[in-house]
Amino acid sequence: MKADTMDTTANKDEEEMGSTVCQADSFRYTPIGIVRSPFTDTAGMPIQPAGAKGVRGTIALRPDLKAGLADLKGFSHIILIYAFHRSKGYSLEVTPFLDTARHGVFATRAPKRPNAIGISIVRLIAVEENVLIIENVDLLDGTPLLDIKPYVPAFDAFSDAKAGWLDQTAGNAESARADERFR
Amino acid sequence: MKADTMDTTANKDEEEMGSTVCQADSFRYTPIGIVRSPFTDTAGMPIQPAGAKGVRGTIALRPDLKAGLADLKGFSHIILIYAFHRSKGYSLEVTPFLDTARHGVFATRAPKRPNAIGISIVRLIAVEENVLIIENVDLLDGTPLLDIKPYVPAFDAFSDAKAGWLDQTAGNAESARADERFR
């Protein structure tokens, strides 16, 4: 697994310089923008977009990437991939917000995961230059954004999927709020 | 945007060492495992899980992370987040496999994006120790896996979402195959 992909990262320089500071078999991503939301603290935050209905936020995309937004405004929903930048360390078994039992971290969306990457599907309201207006925002203000992908029902909507332990509790996501356990 | 999150990465060491080799405002992720699939070359690959129905693959999770898989087997689908490790550089406007017109890269799933991160929703067949058997695999053999999340219809299924230019063409994803344009 050689990290030979990221022309936009420091990997190339690291290899050229023969530095041993950074591991070779890892991937480095520089944020493409930043999320602005009403949530400045994790405590009390909605834990899923379902619990953040109508909550507005914005994405300030890096101005040099603006051309990448062409044609995005035809999509009603977008997938945000971002860094859980306030999450420290990880646990392999966690008690998520929606349950009182412990589950493997990969069977949850908890932020304290080996790679603290989050995804949220939000509603896209408008695209104005390099700024996106979004709704149903369950992200912390200042969240570093790594990627935006269009949400496509043909690829992404499996309404009959079985959701394990979450089949019993996912409906509670609308009312559940974050507390301090995943800081 | 300070990279203060990744206890599992080299960031902390870099900061402590005061190295200038790596940028501070980026995020480094070490793969949690590797995807095995029948596809050893991008040319001719399915471009979406919809085009890879029944194609089996495996995920070899790092053995030290095995406990994180507890309770995952109750889910019929999982979201894989991975590095497009063969993708080099990026374009802000691309002509995706499903269209003949150019679109902003963030309105596509094309691999040549500022941060070459991919997501695929695959069917989970079995969990055997640290190995997952998966189906509908549209990933290249050897793909470095960054995260696994459970697919939850209550969070992820918006069957009535509008998919912009892809509303006309997403149905073709079942038959479309990759070519060399995104290498």
Image (cartoon, coloured by chain):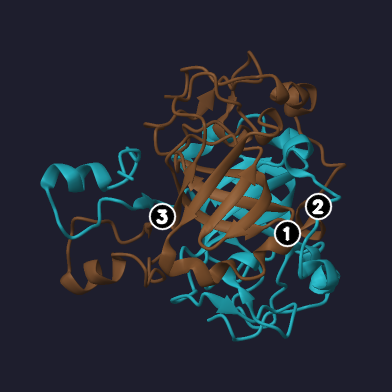
Chain colours: A brown, B cyan
- Cα distance between the residues tagged 1 and 2: 8 Å
Question: Which residue type does callout 1 highlight?
Answer: Phe
Find out whether the residues at labels 1 and 2 contact each other: C-beta distance under 8 Å: yes
Image height of B149 relative to A4, above or below: above
Closer-to-camera residue (B4/B71)? B4
Q: Which quadrant holds residue B49?
A: bottom right
Q: Secondary structure at mark 3?
A: loop
Where is mark 1, residue-wise? A75
Indicate the chain on which mark 3 is placed. Answer: A
Question: Which residue type does callout 3 highlight?
Answer: Pro
Closer-to-camera residue (A55/A99)? A55
Image coords of residue B64 (percent x, y): 44, 38
Q: Which circle marks residue A31 in the picture? A: 3
Q: Which circle marks residue A43 in the picture? A: none
Same chain check for tags 3 and 1 = yes
- Cα distance between the residues tagged 3 and 2: 27 Å
- Cα distance between the residues tagged 3 and 1: 22 Å
Question: Which residue type does callout 2 highlight?
Answer: Ala
Find out whether the residues at labels 3 and 1 contact each other: C-beta distance under 8 Å: no
Where is mark 2, residue-wise? B161
Q: Residues within 10 Å of mark 1 (few under 14, many from 20)?
A: many
Indicate the chain on which mark 2 is placed. Answer: B
Image coords of residue A167 (percent x, y): 79, 28
Q: Quadrant of the C terminus of chain A?
A: top left
